[in-house]
Image (tube, grey):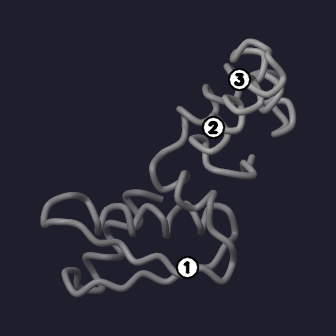
Amino acid sequence: MRLSSPIYKLKRQARLMAREKQIKLHVALDQIATTEGFQNWGHLSAHYAQMTPAQHVLMQLDAVDMVLIGARPGQGKTLLGLELSAVAARHNQTGCFFTLDYTPRMYVNSFWRLG
């Protein structure tokens, strides 16, 4: 299920709602979770915790978005790109993956291991 906003923004909305309506924070969190289609905040956070980093990124993308991944060497950029491609394929979405580190054969072997 796709959230309307990233989880940190939903938490901020709940804090503001709790202050504005003078209700407890857990009640405001549950109200936010209900508007997002979950039973309560615990259900939303459990669903969110089961997702991989690639699923978190993909959940926030629209069909025309492009993702550029940058980080220091050895931080998992290529693996995240491959995982994004695999998750998109599982959801019948189209994606392109470009790297200068992998040969086509290395890419296909890695892709099928994630698949």
Quick check: marks 3 and 1 in contact, CB under 8 Å?
A: no
Foreground mark, 3 or 1?
Answer: 3
Residue at point 13%, 66% (across, down): 73
Reading the image, the residue beneath label 1 is: 95
Q: Mark 1 or mark 2, which has the lower sequence index?
A: 2
The spot of residue 69 in percent (x, y) is: 35, 72
- Establish if 69 lies above or below 75: below
In screen coordinates, is 20 left or right of 105?
right
Foreground mark, 3 or 2?
Answer: 2
Residue placed most toward the observer, 55 or 16: 16
Say few, some or many: other residues with alpha carbon within 10 Å of mark 2 (under 14 / 14 to 19 / 20 or more): few
The spot of residue 60 in percent (x, y) is: 62, 60
Foreground mark, 1 or 2?
Answer: 2
Residue at point 39%, 67% (across, down): 82
Amino acid residing under circle 1: Gly
Residue at point 36%, 75% (across, down): 108
Q: Which mark is residue 41?
A: 3
Reading the image, the residue beneath label 2 is: 12
**Numbered-mark total:** 3
Amino acid residing under circle 2: Arg
SS for callout 1: loop
